[in-house]
Amino acid sequence: MATPVTQIEQDAREIHAHRGDVDPGEIAVGVVIGRASEFFDFFVYAIASVVVFPKLVFPFVDPLTGTLYSFAIFALAFIARPFGTTLFMAIDRHHGRGAKLAAALFLLGTSTVAIAFLPSYDTIGAAVIWLLAVFRIGQGVAWGGTWDGLAPLLAINAPAGRRGWYAMLPQLGAPIGLIIASALFAFFLGNLSAADFYDWGWRYPFFVAFAINVVALFARLRMAVTPQYARLFESGDLEPQKVSETLRVEGRGILIGAFAPLATFALFHMVTVFPLSWVFLFTSERPTRFLLIEALAAFCGLAAVLVSGTIADRVGRRALLGGSAVAIAAFSGFAPQLLAGGVVGEALFMVLAFTLLGISFGQSSGVVASHFAPKYRYTASALTNDLAWLFGAGFAPLAALLLSSHFGLLASGAYLLSGAICTLVALRFDRRLELATGG
């Protein structure tokens, strides 16, 4: 399949012209930078959904209702993401990988920086709600186009006995993005008056997100024009296919793959977004301190992601995910009590949760990708990733806060338990699929 070459790809290729092949470590760095930029965007918006948008966009309702409305708009990006994948796969087929990545990251950066200029409800009324929703959908569509396919391919094409380690590398972007986003918001919240923060201070992290997206664009283009990447494309491992055809051929595996990491993705938002909303709404604690606790706990998550690679190479990725789901199920039984236990309880909750999250999240990418036919693997992996985030994370903050506000924090534990059960069931079906296909 001939790939159109854009000017931006030609420029990037000149970087490699005098060096030949690029070291695999450089490709891994490019993957981490790309994922960190996505997650930084993600967490900047998530934090603003708790501390900014209820006051700026929904001041006409009480803080709890405003936060629930904010979380509803938060979910729109996850709904839009599969549509973005469909759109950008078509761009990939007709105009090339460089055009796809450039367009997707341009849309992501534009949507993100547009939020920084968002006026308040007091200024333009209900129109601000529609603007926020449009910008959030723009972010979701763009995320569908930022898929480069290297996350599962790093694992599938890893040296013998090192698959878990290579699968872990792209996942480092999540705790890195969270640490930077939490630290930025904590700085502005801690050093500005409330009036200044809500007037202009909260906007700066969105400007930083735009700048990071520019860096990520060049990092990903540098990766996309390497000879190794070109060989993977020519072999079919990175060839985009029509979404409708991919769903018809690989639909069962995509569905199983979407539910396999459900416990991980449910915990992801239960430890990053939901606790901030609970502390902000139902305690007297300032969000600055909790954001710092979150940033420090994310370092534990970063270490746990690294450890997950070594563990997975010893016991297997499926065994690690299954064991993590059991551990998450056990954690769901006492997590609410910790979160309600004051500053010490919150800190313990965050450290334990991030440790569990890091171990499971480190191996959650492309767990069933090896079952996909090489022709469909790139598109099927993208759709699996989209649906996993939609089912496991898209509505998690909204559901957890809604349940907890009506039935107490124990309800959030029940929600987390349901995700763990779904993961164990999906892994069982995945095992049957592997045996059926001889994988």
Image (cartoon, rainbow, N blue to C red):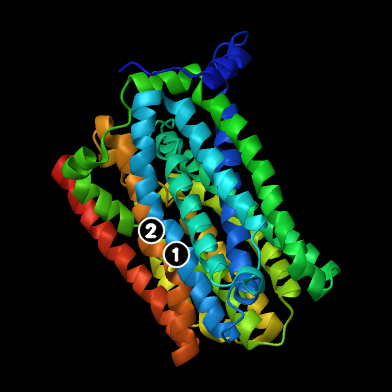
Q: Dot 1, crowdedness within 10 Å: few (<14), some or many (≥20)?
A: many
**Quadrant of the image containing the N terminus:** top left
Q: Please say if the residues under marks 2 and 1 sit with CB atoms less than 8 Å apart.
A: yes
The image position of residue 338, as x and y in percent, is 58, 83
Residue drawn 52% across the image and 32% down it: 102
Q: Categorize mark 2 by other alpha carbons within 10 Å: few (<14), some (14-19), many (20+).
A: many
x, y percent for residue 14: 60, 12
Residue that label 2 marks: 79
Residue 254, compared with residue 148, is above or below; it is: below
Residue drawn at the location 42% of the way across and 68% of the way down: 395
In the rendered image, the vertical position of residue 95 relative to residue 282, given as above or below: above
The residue depicted at 81 percent of the width and 69 percent of the height is 196
Q: Which amino acid does label 1 sit on?
A: Ala
State the image coordinates of residue 135 (x, y, percent, origin top left). Answer: 53, 55
Would residue 238 be visible to someone looking at this image? no
The answer to whether residue 266 is seen in the rendering is yes
Q: Is residue 70 left or right of residue 432?
A: right
- Residue type, label 2: Ile
Tag 2's secondary structure?
helix
